[in-house]
Amino acid sequence: MKTATKRAIVGAAALILSVATLTGCSNGAGAGTGGAAGGTGGDAKSAKIGLLLPDSVTARYASADRPLFTAEVKNKCSGCSVVYANADGDASKQLQQAQSMLTQGVKVLVLDPFDGEAAASIVQQAKAKNVPVISYDRLIDSADLSYYISFDNEKVGELQGTALVDALKKKNAPAGAGIIMVNGSPTDNNASQFKAGAHKVIDASGYKVLAEYDTPGWDPAKAQDWASGQVSKLGADKITGVYAANDDTGGGVIAALKSAGVKKLPPVTGQDASLAGVQRILSGEQYMTVYKAFKPEASQAADLAVDFANGKKPSSSTTVKTKGGASVPATLLQPVAVTADNVESTVVKDGLYKVTDICTSQYAAACTAAGIK
C-alpha cells in the first residue's frame, strides 16, 4: 500500500512537472510557418542554440565562422549558449549530431549542411519539435526552412570566371587556350551555383575547358590527385589556367603542378580568402580568391538565431528557391574578388587578418612588394 501511494505521488509530481514545462516561459512556439517560431519550452534568455558545420577541411569554419558566431550570440544574449558540432564531411554524422542537439533542447539550429539534400531530414525532425532551422552558407533542399543566409553564389562563380579570363588575356593567352576546372563538392548546392556562374563567363570567353572535376567533400587531397592525373594526361604546358572553386582545392592543384616540376604556374582562382590562400596570392602562386565577409554572415546568423529563440520572426530582404522549388526567406550578402592589389583594402581592412598574420617572415618581401604595411 505504501509502495502504491509512493507511486501515485511520483506520478502526480511528474504530471505537474510536465504541465509546467509546457506552459511556462514560452518563446513563442507555434507562430509562423516552417518552424519559424522558437523551440519548445525553456527561457529564451538562457537558450541553447545549435551550430552545425559541415567539414574540417575548409579552414574558414574553425578560424572564422564558429568563433564569430559564438561571440555574437554571447553579445546579443549573454545567458545563451552555443552547442557546436562539425560533421567532418559525413552526412550521417551530421544527422546524429543534430538529433543529439534536439534531444538536448536547443531552441534553434543553425545548419551548414554537408549534403544539402540529406539535411532535409534534419529540418523535418526539427520541425516536429518546433525548432526553427537557419540554413547557413549552403542551402538545404527543404520547404520547411525558417531562413537562409549566404552570399550570391552564382555571382561568386562569375567573379572567379571573370578574374581568370582577365588574367589569361593579360598573359595574351590565345583563343582556345586550355583551362581545367576543379569544382566544389557534388553534395553542396552552392558548388553547383559557383560552377554555373563560372561557366557563364568561361564558356563565352573563347578559352576551352579541357576537363573538369567535382571534388568530393571539397577535399584538397582529392583535388590534388585529380590535377596530377590531368597534368600527366594533358601535359602541363596545355593547362593555361585553373578554375578552382575554393582556396583549399586551389592549393591542392598548385601542389600538383609544383610536384610535376611546373615553375611558372598558370593563374589559379580560389574562394574563402583563407590565410594560406591570401599568402599564396601575395607570393604569386595563386591569382585570386573571393572574399565572402564571414563576420557579417556569422553575426547576422547569430542575430537571427537569437530572434527565433525569442519567438520573433525576422524579416528578410529577399527569398530564394530550393532545388525542390520552395521559397525561403533569405539574406544574400555580396562577395568581393581579391587579388594582390586589394588584399589590404579588403581582408585586412575588415579585420579578418592582421598584417602580422599574413606577413610572416616567409611572405615579408611579398607584402612589401604589394605595399602592405
Image (cartoon, rainbow, N blue to C red):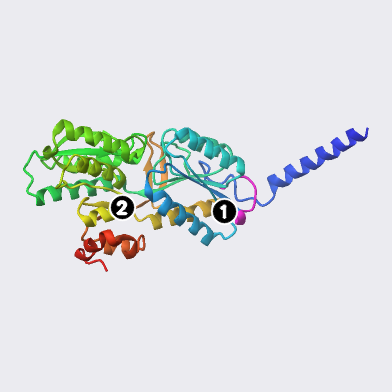
On screen, residue 57 versus residue 2, left or right, reads left
The stretch of residues the image draws in magenta is 38-46
Q: Which residue is mark 1?
A: 81
Q: In the image, residue 35 lies at what x, y percent?
A: 53, 42
Q: Crowdedness of circle 1 by 10 Å Cα count: few (<14), some, many (20+)? A: some
Who is closer to the viewer here, 111 or 219?
219
Distance (Cα) linking label 2 and label 1: 31 Å
Question: Quadrant where the C terminus lies?
Answer: bottom left
Is 40 one of the magenta-colored residues?
yes
Q: Which mark is residue 370?
A: none
Task: Using the image, determine if residue 76 lies above or below residue 130.
Answer: below
Q: Which residue is mark 2?
A: 276
Amino acid type, mark 1: Ser
Who is closer to the viewer here, 323 or 185?
185
Q: In the image, residue 149 lies at what x, y percent?
A: 41, 49
Question: Quadrant where the N terminus lies?
Answer: top right
